[in-house]
Image: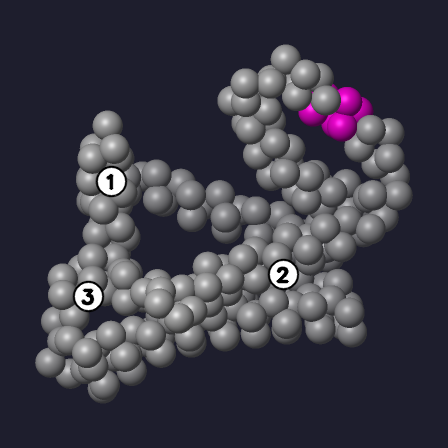
Amino acid sequence: MSPVRILRAAGFVGVIVAYQFAAHHAASTPDAHGLGLALVLAPLLLITLNAAARASARAWLLPLWAFACAALWCGRAPLTAHFGWGLWLEHASFNLALAWMFGRTLGHGREPLCTQFATMVHGKLEARVVRYTRRVTLAWTLFFVATALVSSVLFACASIVAWSTFANYLALPLVGLMFVAEYACRRIALPDMEPSSIMDAVRAYTHSMQMRRSGAQ
């Protein structure tokens, strides 16, 4: 991986970590609820602004975006009082989206996502490896569903600080633990398979996307 890509990846991770620290601060500090609302709305507003600016109908989409911002500003008081709902919705929906991304590839006639990644790294796979990667895809699907479920139960039944501790401080380390557990299971189930890391899959996926773009041109 080139130094530029390493810096981009490090910057992306840094932004995520900073966001989570800020979100927990907003959830645990009564005077920082305005920050919490900003953290909820900023990603959505930036995404919609980018989409509006790129759209062919931007002549009316951009004024509509500005009007929506003005409406949100006028209604900031009640929104600030309930900003936690927005943080929970972002966290739960993100994990459910990941669960859907993995789970939809388990349907009949489809290639499981982890099988796709393994094929990118190792080439043609043996049947036993295909079976294993299918189980891994199912495991990731269940993991993200469980994360969304725990997040929702904590938000409904525990304090906002308890929920935020899980969502902002524990969820990502659990993803890392999942990678470690999967690697350990792989070494047991497929001891003769050449070891590979998540970065190998990322590089293979990036190369595949570049090849597709060049082929489409």
- Ranked by sequence position, the earlier of labels 2 and 3 is 2
Q: Which of marks 1 and 2 is in front?
A: 1
Amino acid carrying mark 3 in the image: Ser
Q: Do the residues labelled 2 and 3 touch (CB within 8 Å)?
A: no
Q: Which of marks 1 and 2 is nearer the N terminus?
A: 2
Residue type (three-letter) at the residue carrying disc 2: Ala
Residue 175 seen in this snapshot: no
Residue at 61% x, 31% y is: 48
Q: What is the magenta segment's predominant secondary structure? A: helix
Judging depth in this view, the residue of 185 and 34 nearest the camera is: 185
Q: Is residue 111 left or right of residue 55?
A: left
| Viewer-closest of 99 and 39 | 99
Which label is found at residue 212?
1
Q: Quadrant of residue 12?
A: top left
Tag of residue 196: 3
Q: Which of 216 and 186 is in front in this view?
A: 216
The amino acid pointed to by label 1 is Arg
Label 1: state its secondary structure.
Answer: helix
> Which residue in the structure is indicated by mark 2?
92
Drawn side of residue 67 relative to residue 176, left or right:
right
